[in-house]
Amino acid sequence: MPTALFNAGIFSNSTLNAAAIAAYADANPNVAGNQTLGTNQAIIFGWNNGTYLSVNDNLAPFNANSDLLVNVTFSTIALIIFYSLLIYCSQLLT
């Protein structure tokens, strides 16, 4: 399970891979500077009118061959997973 979940915002890169790399490079755009997504952390970001959830493995940065990347746009199962991740991450903080 991820140790943290971030919303990186919306990206306009030309490819999904490039958008994921950019999201991993600045996981929290609400804080000045770049906050690189850490190992075993999750991120949600928008690209090309879709919403994506990615979970970093135990190696940084983004690797299309080993990191989870799921299109969660209009996906009921994905929303359940997302909600479960939120609950899990919030329990880690308490």
Image (cartoon, rainbow, N blue to C red):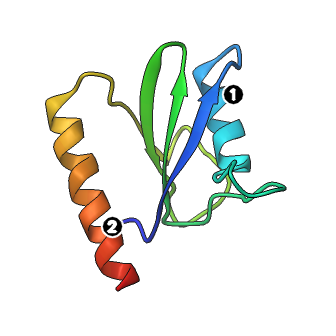
Q: Amino acid at mark 2?
A: Met
Residue 4, above or below 34: below
Furthest residue toward right: 33
Place residue 91 in its image quadrant: bottom left
Give coordinates of residue 92: x percent, y percent. 35, 80
Do labels 2 and 1 touch, CB within 8 Å? no
22 with respect to 53 (left or right): right
| Neighbour tally class for label 2: few under 14, some 14-19, many 20 plus, Cα within 10 Å | few
Label disc, if present, on residue 18 of the rendered structure:
1
Residue found at x 31% / y 59%? 86
Secondary-structure class at tag 1: helix
Q: Quadrant of the C terminus?
A: bottom left
Dot 2 corresponds to which residue?
A: 1
**Residue 62 location (% of width, % of height):** 63, 46
Question: Looking at the image, is mark 2 or mark 1 earlier in the sequence?
Answer: 2
Q: In terms of depth relative to the viewer, which is nearer, 10 or 30?
A: 30
Residue at position x 68%, y 18% in the image: 12
Q: Tell me: residue 33, above or below residue 91.
A: above
Q: Who's the residue at 81% across and 56% down the image?
A: 32
